[in-house]
Image (cartoon, grey):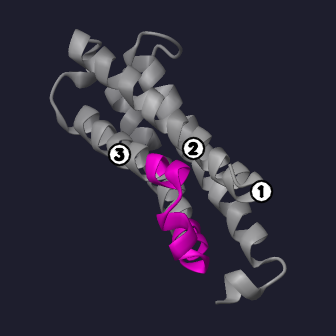
């Protein structure tokens, strides 16, 4: 209720939400580019272990701010196509990233690992784009 009635509540939550997304995208981007053979010469599995606390923290910030934003207008978001796309891509991105992390040799640059890294990047950036589309849908009723 506070979010939907407060003048600044939603904006503050959205700021934290975007900060969390930026942290997640940054860490995932670096890890997946490493799997693709671009960037750091550090082994991808080691890099993923070192960045995991940052990725998890960013994800928790995203969820901790996203849930109250959703709850402020749950009925509106439930019928929003960009929101449904965002949630589908978010679920897919998390599943892909966990698979890359848990399946042996996915960080070794195998064809399957590279495919998963590419799909993961598409999903994570799709989450960001779909999130942006939600605000355009709200503003312009598109």
Q: Bin the neighbour count of mark 2 within 10 Å (Cα to Cα): few under 14, some 14-19, many 20 and up.
A: many
Q: Identify the residue under disc 1.
A: 139
Q: Identify the residue under disc 2.
A: 130
Magenta segment: 65-86
Q: Nearer the viewer, mark 2 or mark 1?
A: 1
SS of the residue under disc 1: helix
> What numbered label is drawn on residue 94?
3
Q: Residue at x 27, y 32 (%)?
A: 100
SS of the residue under disc 2: helix
Q: Is residue 27 visible?
A: no
Answer above or below: position of 35 versus 86.
above
Q: Residue at x 35, y 45 (%)?
A: 94
Answer above or below: position of 72 versus 110.
below
Q: Bin the neighbour count of mark 3 within 10 Å (Cα to Cα): few under 14, some 14-19, many 20 and up.
A: some
**Residue 29 point in image, percent of width and height:** 52, 29
Q: Residue at x 69, y 81 (%)?
A: 3
**Residue 104 point in image, percent of width and height:** 15, 28
Q: Residue extending furthest left?
A: 104
SS of the residue under disc 3: helix
Distance (Cα) linking label 1 and label 3: 29 Å
45 relative position to 99: left or right? right
Q: Residue at x 48, y 56 (%)?
A: 59
**Residue 65 point in image, percent of width and height:** 59, 68
């Amino acid at each position: 209720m506070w979010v939907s009635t407060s003048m600044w509540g939603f904006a503050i939550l959205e700021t934290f939400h975007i900060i969390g997304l930026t942290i997640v995208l940054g860490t995932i981007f670096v890890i997946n580019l490493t799997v693709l053979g671009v960037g750091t010469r550090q082994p991808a599995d080691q890099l993923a272990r070192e960045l995991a606390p940052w990725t998890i923290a960013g994800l928790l910030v995203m969820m901790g701010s996203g849930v109250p934003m959703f709850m402020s207008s749950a009925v509106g978001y439930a019928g929003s196509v960009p929101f449904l796309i965002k949630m589908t891509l978010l679920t897919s991105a998390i599943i892909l990233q966990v698979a890359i992390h848990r399946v042996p040799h996915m960080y070794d640059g195998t064809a399957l690992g590279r495919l998963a890294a590419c799909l993961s990047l598409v999903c994570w950036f799709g989450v960001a784009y779909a999130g942006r589309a939600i605000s355009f849908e709200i503003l312009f009723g598109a």
